Image (cartoon, coloured by chain):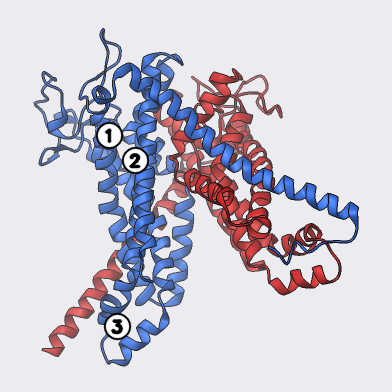
Amino acid sequence: MRRARRALETAGEFALAGVAAALGLGLLALLVLVVWQGIAQVGTVQRAVALLTALPRELEPGGGIGPQIFNTVFLATLSTVATVPVGVAAAAWLARFARQGPFVHAVRTALDALATLPSIVYGLFGFLLFVVTLKLGYTVLGGALVLACLNLPLVVGIAEESIRATPRELEDASLALGASPVQTLFRVTLPHAMPGILSAVVLAIGRVFAESAPLVYTAGLTTDPRTPFSLSPMRSGETLAVHLWYLNSNGVVPDRKLIAAGSAAVLVLLAVIVNLVGRRIARVR
Amino acid sequence: MTDMARATPNPRTRRRDALVKVLLAGSAFVVIAVAVSIVGMIAQAGLRGFAHAGFFASLFGLRWSPEDTPPSFGFLPYLANTLLSATGAVLMGAVPAMLAAVYLAEMAHARVRRSFRSVMEVAAALPSVVYGYIALTYLVPRFANPHLGCQGLGLASASLVLAAMIAPTIALLSLDVLERTPRELRDASSALGVSRWHTTWHAVFPAARRGLVVAGFFGFARAVGETMAVQMVAGNGRYAALAGLRPAGARVMDNVCAHLGPLELFRPTSTISTRIVMDMPETQPGTPWNNVLFSMSLVLLCVSTLVVLITRRISRTAPT
């Protein structure tokens, strides 16, 4: 009787191990498959360099994703520049200066609401605000600001947590030495919370790399071929993730399979790099 | 923060402190302003759509033919597809992810658990379009059946993509939940002489159950909101996957690729979010059709808010 139960439990553990292995190895296999297919389909180093730097073409083969990679980084920079000061300031206020009350409650409710909104809703909001109301057309700035809003709850959440994790004794020591609360915040609390804040920044950048739904109707699906690497935020600019979607759903370029495989591989590698950087920062803490 | 608000002697420092505090509170106010303007603008355009198309006629209407005269804006089939694909994703993605997390948290070696976490972290951060691309390239062709005229696009493909997409996030959340359950629970249980298996399911699992349910709801909310990956594999047809939701007089499909009871698995179809993305460039801002698209996003917003409220209710009453 007991032995039979023992055997059943062992079988159960094996079954669970099978599920875990299937999920872990399955997803790992997907990651490897995408990178490997990207390398295999691009084939040569020359083609890889051309793919990563050249302009995209609409009809003939040989195009690249240079502007898309540039736009992705550009948009991530703009979005981070917008989201981090506001997010960290709001977090600092919530963690150190706010008094419990209706205003704090409203901020928390707003953060919860922002965290739960589907990303397409952010995209539609950006479309309504920047394209319809302000008549700016599709702009990198619009896309970046929409993603900045999308990342706000993430940045505020992690920043607040790491600010709260700063030991009270350190701050009290600073205050006892005659520093003002704000001086203490900037000289003691924020430096101590910096690893946490930086990992929030890394996560936010990773989301900019990954998002597509909020960008289609804000940053747009095109890049002006005359000024592909322009630093103007008031132009349309397609990111790499959006381009991968475009290639698969509307693309007509004959070598779009190759370009899609290469783009997907770049996106996977970007996710891996972001993860490694984030881990590095977490270890510093 | 009374101890931080101790008076500082230097009036200039005090003035600067006051200014900085106002700026910090102002940033917190920006958060409120952003949330209010997003919900407000979507609601305004969405209510205009409902006012034009009729709340019940659109939310419970079965026919989507906006270019007809008079147009019909019934989007219940799309809402049903959204909920069905998300449910399928939770069944196929969340449940295995939770079982895997139970194994890794309770029975696996710590090193295995760390490697699993790394893979899940990268997989969770992957763009959803990469999942869509993988499915479109390697999965959909396997489902295709040219003899029946099936391309392999449809609700089943969408659901599978969503399952793969939410599984890593749910696995990570579940691992967190399980690792937060108190050590003493396991010690007390094994001190009674019961096996690891018994401890897992009778001591740890009951304590973690609510947390796991919350993780599942979180995955559901994410699946409801996902757009681009689903758009790539759902086929973008105007066809209700659920048999009962097709309008009277709809073209009867004689060749059925594969079905599960009243559910057609491989018929090009749409969810709310994919319909919005597909129709947005077809319409001019301010037209009824365009406004109804915003009504649909308002419904989407309400569904995900509802799911999160339910989740909150569950986690607030959690015993641990």
Q: Are marks 1 and 2 in contact (CB under 8 Å)?
A: yes
**Distance (Cα) linking label 3 and label 2:** 40 Å
Residue B290, label in figure:
none
Q: Residue at x 84, y 50 (%)?
A: B16
**Distance (Cα) linking label 1 and label 3:** 44 Å
- Kind of element beneath mark 2: helix
Tag 1 subunit: B
Q: Tell me if residue A83 comes above or below residue A8 in the rendering.
A: above
The residue that label 2 is drawn on is B303
**Side (left or right) of B232 relative to A96:** left
Residue B79, label in figure:
1
Q: Are marks 1 and 3 in contact (CB under 8 Å)?
A: no
Residue type, numbered disc 2: Val
Residue type, numbered disc 3: Arg
- Which mark sits nearer the N-terminus, 1 or 2? 1
In which image quadrant can residue B237 be found?
A: top left
Residue B309 position within the rendered picture, expressed as x and y whole percent measured from the top left: 37, 50
Q: Tell me if residue B229 comes above or below residue A115 in the rendering.
A: above
